Image (spheres, rainbow, N blue to C red):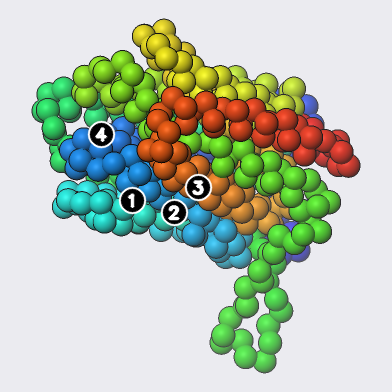
Amino acid sequence: MADRSGGRKDTESDLPAAPGAAFRLSPVIIWLGVVSMMTDISSESVSAILPLYVTGFLGLSTIAFGFIDGINQGASAIVRIAAGWVSDSTGHPKRVAVAGYGLSMLARIGFLFAGGVGAVAAIVTGDRIGKGIRTAPRDALISEAAQPDYLARSFGIHRMLDNIGAAAGPLIAFLVLLAIPQGFSTVFVVSLAFSAIGVAVLVLIVPGRKGPRPRREARTRRPLRGPRLRFPRITWAHLKEQGLGRLMLTAGLLGILTIGDGFIYLILQNRDSFAVQWFPLLFVGTNAAFLLFAVPLGRLADRWGRVPVFLSGHVALLACYLLAALPFGGLGVTLGCLVLLGLFYAATDGVLAALVSQLSAPEKVGTALGTAQTVVALSRMAAASGFGVLWFAVGAGTAMVCVAVLLAAALGAAAILMRGPGRQVIAR
């Protein structure tokens, strides 16, 4: 059948999978997973040492770390919606993603010269803005390449590859610090190298979009100006009718009670007083659990329901908070916290992206993903900054108990928010 946009003949591979079709994984998703894996080795090797680098090597307070971790969580929100819109409007999500990955790579260079809280905050801001630019167009490419009936599983496979890097990065940081005590600069050099590899794979191997481009306006009397981009707005009516509004509100409510992993790890380290060089292994444990559960929970979300899995992930986070707040520690408690954190990420990260993709019109999926990511980033930025102040004011254990109680109440509210009119749309 002729394609209206350009007379191109549709092929069987261009058509979405029929309901009940066998699962087939697109090579695009594999290569994007490799790019994310290299980039996560880069970013997580730095994230694994950042809490100790800030509070130990630089000698700053938990308030300062909360400020920097807040930037780490939320600075990307500045550009997420805009990046998704540009991706949708131009029909070239790969180009937008390359810009984001490239900016993060350049920011890595700054760590080699950073010497204070201002410099570290500026570098983290640049890196996170790069993340904000790349995430929505990358997820749009995944959504386009995936079969509709297997969205959560496809995102789960990508997140699995992503978290191979997320587990390897802290492990590399641990080995560096084990061989070179206080070898933070060496970790920064290794981080830059892996970031460059990821950008090279994206540019040279990952194909651009092959699907239909966004509709363009007809030519006017001044054709030399070219077609004018149309803003694919996410209107309130669209949010209300499709269930996106409740989903965004739920994600924001739960996100504001999702403190950064670094705080949980600092609590575990302060309570058990293990050596500094072992600290990166906490990140390895969480990401290994994420890697283990990402695909099974993606499959479960596609079959059982994406909303129930998403909310259950936050129940695992609540259990992690309660374990971290215990007055006693030990290896069993620490491992329990890491497994629960991994379960939380496996049940929420890719599942939320699948939910947003499911509820969005194809021409608006990048903008919708960027909007959801902005909501999560801003709420987690507030959570990190607020928890740093709360820890300073009342102590680590009491602060953790307070957040756990609030999260339990928020889960009840979230369960109510995701019910009501339109439940049949968002149940899966």
On screen, 341 above or below 370? above
Q: Residue flagged by tag 4: what amino acid is it?
A: Leu
Asked if the residue under mark 1 is in contact with the one under mark 2, i.e. CB atoms within 8 Å, the reply is: yes
Q: Looking at this rendering, what residue extends furthest in the front direction?
A: 394
Q: Which mark is residue 124?
A: 1
Q: Which residue is mark 4?
A: 52
Which mark's residue is nearer the viewer, 3 or 2? 3
**SS of the residue at dot 3?**
helix
Q: Residue flagged by tag 1: what amino acid is it?
A: Val
On screen, 146 above or below 318? below
- Return the x and y of residue 128 as percentages of the image width and height: 40, 51
Q: CA distance from mark 4 to mark 2?
A: 21 Å
**SS of the residue at dot 1?**
helix
Camera-nearest residue between 209 and 280: 280
The quadrant in which residue 201 appears is: top left
Which mark's residue is nearer the viewer, 4 or 2? 4
Q: Residues within 10 Å of mark 1 (few under 14, many from 20)?
A: many
Residue 373 visible in the displayed image:
no
Q: Which mark is residue 382?
A: 3
On screen, 191 above or below 270? below
User: Along the horizontal axis of the image, is 131 left or right of 51?
Assistant: right
- Return the x and y of residue 43 as percentages of the image width and height: 34, 40
Q: Which mark is residue 75?
A: 2
Q: Residue flagged by tag 3: what amino acid is it?
A: Ala
Residue pictured at 33% horizontal, 19% vertical? 271
Residue pictured at 38% horizontal, 33% vertical? 262
Disc nearer the start of the sequence (3/2): 2
Disc nearer the start of the sequence (1/4): 4
Which mark's residue is nearer the viewer, 1 or 4? 4
Disc nearer the start of the sequence (3/4): 4
Q: CA distance from mark 2 to mark 1?
A: 8 Å
User: Along the horizontal axis of the image, is 33 left or right of 266?
Assistant: right
